[in-house]
Amino acid sequence: MTVRYGSLFIALILSLQYRMLVCSENFC
């Protein structure tokens, strides 16, 4: 697993968590 792929995967998870947090506080 390359570093570039790992960082990209982490960024994807963080964006999904951020989106879920915004949807929970505000309406989507």
Image: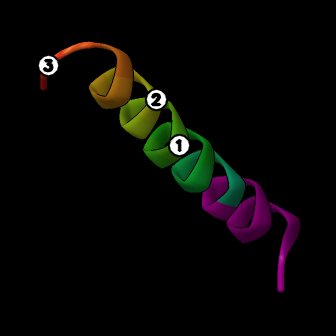
**Which amino acid type corresponds to the residue marked 2 in the rendered image?**
Leu
Can you tell which mark lies on residue 21?
2
Residue 20, picture quadrant: top left
| Residue 19: image location, x then y, percent | 38, 33
**Which amino acid type corresponds to the residue marked 1 in the rendered image?**
Gln
| In contact (CB < 8 Å): disc 1 and disc 2 | yes
**Which amino acid type corresponds to the residue marked 3 in the rendered image?**
Phe
Q: Which residue is mark 3?
A: 27
Label 1 residue SS: helix
Q: Nearer the viewer, residue 12 or 16?
A: 16
Residue at x 12%, y 26% (from the top left corner): 28
Can you tell which mark lies on residue 17?
1
Q: Nearer the viewer, residue 26 or 7?
A: 26
Which span of residues is magenta-colored?
A: 1-9
Q: Is residue 3 left or right of residue 11?
A: right
| Residue 11: image location, x then y, percent | 62, 46
Q: Is residue 28 left or right of residue 20?
A: left
Residue at x 87%, y 65% (from the top left corner): 3
Of badges 1 and 2, the one in the foreground is: 2
Could you tell me how many numbered marks the image carries?
Answer: 3
